Image: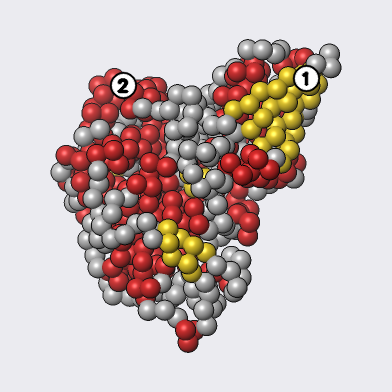
Amino acid sequence: MPNYTIRALPSGESPHWEEQLAGRMAAWAASSPDIPPDIGQMVRLRVLDSFAVGLAAINRGPVASARAMALAHPRAGGAALLGLSPDIRVDCEWAGFANSVAVRELDYNDTYLAADFAHPSDCIAPLLAVAQQTGRTGVALTRAIAIAYEIHVALVRAIDLHSFKKDHVAHLAPAIAAGAGSLMVVAPRVIYEAINQAVHLSFATRQSRKGDISSWKAYAPAQAGKIAVEALDRAMRGEGAPNPIYEGEDSIIPWMLAGKDARYTVRLPVRGAPPAGILETFPKAHSAEYQAQAIIDLAFEARAAVDPATIERAVLHTSDHTHFVIGTGANDPQKMDPKASRETLDHSIMYILAVALEDSAWDHEASYTPERAGRESTVALWNRVETMLDDEWTRRYHADDPTERAYGGSLELTLKSGEVLNFEKAAADAHPNGAAPWQEADYVAKFTRLAEPLLGKDETARVVTQTLSLGGLDAAGLLALNPTAAHGAVTPNAPTGAGIFDFGTES
């Protein structure tokens, strides 16, 4: 897998478009790479997982608002909305937007962690919507999703956004643009222009994941997908975009990242080589920030040995990303506030550890209710938790070898008696390096548990069967793939009249 080193260059020294990072990504995406069975299977499982977590969030406020926005953009021959009848069709960029908000809302979809952070399955909703509107097949969609994962993983592996307080969706948008370009079978130059525009428009600050975290956390990847779809549409019409988008003297590297003297090395497959990046990503067994997954499992193990009421102090020794993003190193008082938003609580390892220790269980709803967050014993334990930066956990977090990577930590519990207990977990049980790496049955079980209350047994079984047969679906099968909930189970299913887009529509 070749390495490409990129840096900022004066305008007079700009490389030919094919030698720029965007050009190299575009050329590989357009090369119709092979999709071996293991990669195709993982794509199918992640589509099923996305449906599961999207349905679990389907009637939450932010998701309902996004769906109402989409419903104000009806289109005959458009794309379907998660949970609604496939007869209800909207413009694909709006279907992708609304469905993406649903998938992201509970912080329950897959993750990849390296130099930066990612939820690679954020690409699935917009790519499925484009495929539905344009009559693509399951084979084409599978390849497009795998390509988007590969580009996303390559960028996250190489380019740190967080240190410069940039939101991680800046790596998502070009990945979706590349996948969509493959889906539409357009020339590399068209994909290149779409990537340039997607990157140019998707850079934003990390304030969306800092302090009092709002529903924009779920909307940010949806907006990145919408940007990418519209960027490809524009490029297909022959329009160009700002370039070089990474290497330009007034562009991303010098002004958004480490400056004009910085170097970044990005590893991409050779043309035609399979996109194996998806195999490095990992699912979530618990609805919380990924760095909390191993810690939740660790808390369950610790709970078997200790009564939380006896804990005087809890110190989690962990990596830089865990400490500074969801730990006490973030210096966010909101992470210690019982009245904080759900979005803030799922980014507080102090809260998560306290609840997991007390309950020895984790639920995407019950673990975040105001009553649960405000419980007196929980607040007391919560305030006894702190995180500490550990060099070895940081080294393992960023290890080049996937088998050595660790996203957990060491938990030191000092009891009121003075006794000190120590527990350790390197990876979540569901992680490929974990105690019980997830297989197909685990994904199916998660989907069934979250979807069946909305869909019923027959529709749940249908969606599982069709999703696991994604590669054999024609255009009609792809349109029917979206799960359809029982009538009236999803609201709203029409414009609400609350926003600008609703004017001139029937509600």
Residue position for label 2: 456
**Is residue 22 or residue 287 the one in the foreground?**
22
Is the image coloured rainbow, by chain, by secondary structure, or in one colour?
secondary structure
Q: Amino acid at mark 2?
A: Gly
x, y (%) of residue 348?
65, 36
Q: The C terminus lies in which quarter of the figure? A: top left
Residue at image position (58%, 42%) is 397
Determine whether the residue tagged by mark 2 lies in a helix, strand or loop: helix
Within 10 angstroms of label 1, few (less than 14), some, or many (20 or more) residues?
Answer: some
Mark 1–mark 2 Cα distance, whole angstroms, equals 49 Å
Residue at image position (59%, 28%) is 425
Tag 1 near tag 2, CB within 8 Å: no
x, y (%) of residue 445?
37, 22
Residue 344 lies in quadrant: top right
Q: Amino acid at mark 1?
A: Val
Residue at image position (43%, 62%) is 3
Give whichever of discs 1 and 2 has the lower sequence position. Answer: 1
Residue 315: tell me if it is visible.
yes
**Is residue 421 or residue 331 the one in the foreground?**
421
Determine whether the residue tagged by mark 1 lies in a helix, strand or loop: strand
Per the rendering, the mark at residue 420 is 1
Within 10 angstroms of label 2, few (less than 14), some, or many (20 or more) residues?
Answer: some
Residue 104: tell me if it is visible.
no
Per the rendering, the mark at residue 453 is none
Q: Nearer the viewer, mark 1 or mark 2?
A: 1
x, y (%) of residue 450?
41, 25
**Is residue 340 or residue 300 the one in the foreground?**
300
